[in-house]
Image (spheres, grey):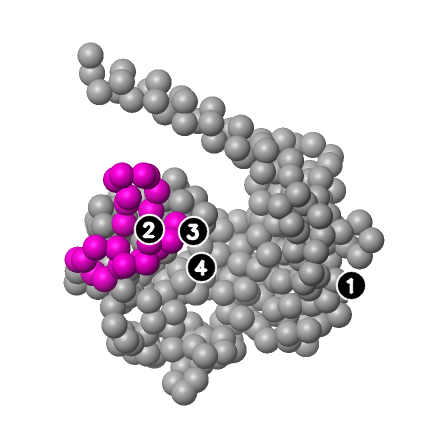
Amino acid sequence: MCSSDLLDPRLQQIRERLDRQARAAVQFWRVHGPDREQGGFHGTLDRQGNPIAPTDKHLIQTVRHLWAMSMWYERRQPEPEIKALADGLYAFLMAHFRDESDDQFYLTVSRAGAPIDRSKLLAGQALAIYALTEYSRVFHVPAAGTQAMATFHAIDTAQHDARFGGYLQLCDGPLSTPEVRKETNTQTHLLEAFTALYTFTQDALVRARLEEMAAVVADHLLQKGGFLDKVFLPDWTPIGAPAVNYGHDLETGWMLLEAARALGRPDDRKLVAAAKTIILNSAAAGYDAAKGGYFEEGPPGGAPAKLEKGWWGQAEALLG
């Protein structure tokens, strides 16, 4: 019996299990997520789905819900209710998070939508571009795509590092003092956002930035030991003790492969080799062979030191 004969039934079991879990998760959010009085989704729910304090609404939470509902509609359930949830999230995002003066988005608003934290976290702008792009594409809403491009141009004008490449994190709290620094998580989410935006728009400047961000991953974020360092000076000099965040590495690997495909370079030796190095090293170092799943973090070449297993790391491992 060949290996594929043994593997196929196992993969089918995994597919069926993930399908059940995905439908249950979406069902929870379609029932309990919407704030039917103030719009958008509730800021915080308890385990039973009841709204609780804090009631503030966060940008990243909102745009992740928008992306998720858009993708679920396209790939699994193209039903009017799912579209209505996505439409409501988009409307709340544009009405309450968007700063008309610069086409960027505030970090936090009240339940009713009044700005609370007016900072413009770069990772938040990246995820907003990503969600707006996919919402525009799936539901044929040109205004959302226009907003995604406007936000791209806003951060590109203000924060693109023409000297060293990548983007300066000017409004990211501790990361921007005392020296402007660059964080792997933010730079890779820009890579992700630009991949979707270029695929949708075929814009020449977006392509140039996507090419640049792919090179940033392969040339600067990836270290000689085959892992990604976490925080850098503007010239990509690593800061602090090196550490491998297994979830981020697994995530970055599949994002780099997606970027290569979007650029028409799915077999690019450099990018594919970098992605494989990142994914396979993290998979080998961070996996819990005894109980399954991936630990959070550890030193390069050493045993995991932070043994928590965040849900998002496991989700990125599936994609990676």
Residue placed most toward the observer, 25 or 138? 25
Residue 298: percent from left, percent from top:
26, 59
Lower position in the chain sequence, tag 3 or tag 1: 1
Q: Residues within 10 Å of mark 1 (few under 14, many from 20)?
A: some
Disc 3 to disc 2: CB gap under 8 Å: no
Residue placed most toward the observer, 107 or 214? 107
Task: Tell me the number on the disc at residue 310.
Answer: 3
Amino acid, disc 1: Ala
Distance from Cα at disc 1 to Cα at disc 4: 28 Å
Q: Does 295 lie within the magenta span?
A: yes
**Is residue 281 visible in the rendered structure shown here?**
yes
Distance from Cα at disc 3 to Cα at disc 1: 30 Å
User: Which residue in the structure is indicated by mark 1?
Assistant: 112
Badge 4 element:
helix
Above or below, 7 relative to 33: above
Lower position in the chain sequence, tag 4 or tag 3: 4
Lower position in the chain sequence, tag 2 or tag 4: 4
**Is residue 94 visible in the rendered structure shown here?**
no
Amino acid, disc 2: Phe
Magenta part of the chain: 286-309
Main secondary-structure element of the magenta-colored stretch: loop
Residue 59: percent from left, percent from top:
61, 62
Distance from Cα at disc 2 to Cα at disc 4: 21 Å
User: Which residue in the structure is indicated by mark 2?
Assistant: 295
Amino acid, disc 3: Gly
